[in-house]
Image: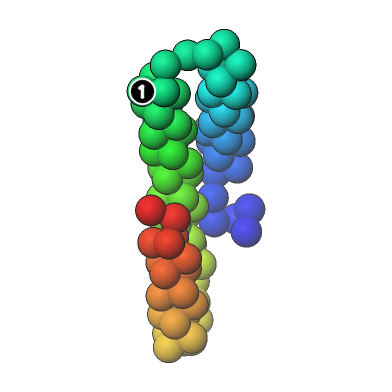
């Protein structure tokens, strides 16, 4: 899996999201207005969605391309369709 994605980029993104989640948790303790908490939750959700996009793009550019180039197009396309289905469930 590491071959098809920029792990450093993903780790940076995920660390940022974890920081956002810790901040949201703190907001709950500090009795921050619900609207403000929801805004931050939506921002974290968007950032997590972007991580999924980056992973899916890497999968397409590396794994799918490699599978098609090595003559296993049907299986590769089927697996890619499953990956897209999993990603679409996130939204």
Residue 6, located in which quarter of the rendered image?
Answer: top right
Q: Residue furthest top?
A: 30
Q: Determine the residue positioned at 39% across, 38% down.
A: 46
Q: Quadrant of the N terminus?
A: bottom right
Q: x%, y% of residue 17?
A: 54, 31
Q: Determine the residue positioned at 60% across, 24% down.
A: 25
Residue 74, located in which quarter of the rendered image?
Answer: bottom left
Q: Determine the residue positioned at 39% across, 19% down.
A: 36
Q: Is residue 19 visible?
A: no
Instruction: Name the element at disc 1.
Output: helix
As drawn, 36 above or below 73: above
Judge by depth and name the residue closer to the eye, 85 or 3. Answer: 85
Judge from the rendering whether residue 65 lies leftward or rightward of residue 26; answer left or right: left
Residue occupied by mark 1? 35
Judge from the rendering whether residue 8 lies leftward or rightward of residue 54; answer left or right: right
Q: Residues within 10 Å of mark 1 (few under 14, many from 20)?
A: few
Q: Is residue 82 visible?
A: yes
Color encoding of the figure: rainbow
Judge from the rendering whether residue 19 lies leftward or rightward of residue 58; answer left or right: right
Q: x%, y% of residue 56?
A: 44, 57
As drawn, 73 above or below 29: below
Q: x%, y% of residue 42?
A: 39, 34
As drawn, 17 above or below 27: below
Q: x%, y% of residue 70?
A: 50, 81
* Label total for image: 1
Q: Determine the residue positioned at 41% across, 50% down.
A: 53
Judge by depth and name the residue closer to the eye, 84 or 55. Answer: 84
């Amino acid at each position: 899996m590491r071959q098809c994605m920029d792990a450093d980029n993903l780790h940076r993104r995920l660390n940022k999201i974890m920081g956002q989640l810790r901040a949201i948790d703190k907001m709950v303790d500090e009795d921050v207005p619900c609207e403000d908490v929801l805004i931050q939750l939506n921002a974290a959700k968007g950032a997590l969605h972007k991580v999924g996009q980056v992973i899916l793009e890497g999968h397409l550019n590396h794994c799918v391309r490699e599978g098609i180039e090595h003559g296993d197009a049907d299986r590769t396309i089927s697996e890619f369709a499953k990956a897209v289905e999993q990603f679409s469930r996130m939204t």
